[in-house]
Image: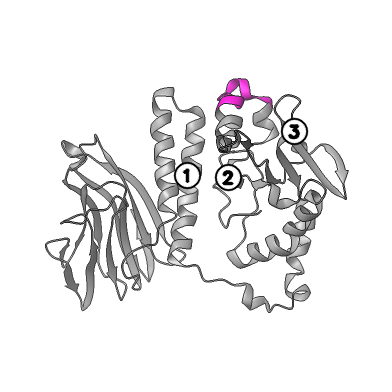
Amino acid sequence: MIKHNSASSVISPFNPVVSLNPQVRQIVNESFIYPKLEKFFQDKGGIDSYEELDPDKIKTEIEFNHKENRESYVKDYVYKELMTRISKNDEGKINFKPRYVISFDQYLTDFPEKEGIRYGKLRLGEKAPILYFIYIDLQELIQFIKNIPEALQIEPEALKVVETSEDRRNRLIDELIAEKYRKLITAPQNQKEEIRAECVRLLSLSTQKIQGNAGIFRVNLSWNTTDDLDLEIETEGGIINYENKIVEYKGIIGKLDIDENANENFVSNPQENITWEELPQGKHIVLVKFFNNRENREKVPFTIFIENGDESRIYDSFVQFTGNNKTKKVVEFEFQDGRLICF
């Protein structure tokens, strides 16, 4: 299925991707792509006998042909992305659903058409296919999208979807993960595990609800240990932090309303949240401090999400309990003529 409203989240720098807003994407998946998949798999046990490969994970014919210059195709792609779901039941029977993925890369789909659908497949040896590439013609898709309002009797204005806070954050997380995967391709071997671990952390974050009030503007900190990190924002009216949770400047109040892992009931996916009901005035400095080291880690990665509609931002960094990185300056921001400026 088409997954994204961000075109930069796939691991392949060569992969053609379509990005659509959430409602259009749902219509395309349900009314255009899913019927094609049902038709294709109807004589192969039905679509329920197959499992979709995460579209982020597809690589292209370019990478397949140049695999000797990159990570091992079998070890780091086929095994890691396709074979990890193989298991045996109590009777010793192998449990594995072959995978499928939608592709706009026609060179991966060079098998003869079946029922008007071009496809490709990946086998291990002479055994049954473990992955089907189902080709979707981009021009046909574009034409379908153009006809959505008329064909489905939807008013054009209804296709404009307001993102939730999680939608905004996850779109930005997708972009962060894509950037890290691109770095992974050329990273030295001793850095690869750390990059993979950070991608796993970000994927886990994308499944969580954002805590605290959204207000008109907010800064949210998240990490994945029981350590105590502190979010601080230096403002021209004072510092907002765990000791001083409410600061007023020019009649506008900034408030720390979520402060986790400071006391008991520690959690492994904590957040801190600072929010304003009006756009804050003046310059602000966002800081993250390592206050209490409970897990004795060398460093703790964190993510800062600044939510301001279409101008939302995300930052990924880390703190250490000792040394110069115990306090990390993340970003400075201010509003100029109503626009968020970060520097």
Per the rendered image, the range of residues in magenta is: 65-75
Q: Amino acid at mark 3?
A: Ala
Q: Is residue 325 left or right of residue 181?
A: left
* Residue in the picture at 72% in, 51% down: 47
Q: Position of residue 302 (x, y in %)?
A: 31, 47
Q: Which mark is residue 128?
A: 3
Which class describes the residues within 10 Å of circle 3: few (<14), some (14-19), or many (20+)? few
Seen from the viewer's position, the closer of residues 267 and 70 is 267
Q: Which residue is mark 1?
A: 177
Q: Position of residue 50 (x, y in %)?
A: 68, 46
Q: Is residue 72 magenta?
A: yes
Q: Amino acid at mark 1?
A: Ile
Lower sequence index among marks 3 and 1: 3
Q: Amino acid at mark 2?
A: Asp
Occupied quadrant, residue 338:
bottom left
Q: Which residue is mark 2?
A: 56
Q: Is residue 261 above or below residue 159?
A: above
Occupied quadrant, residue 99:
top right
Q: CA distance from mark 2 to mark 3?
A: 24 Å
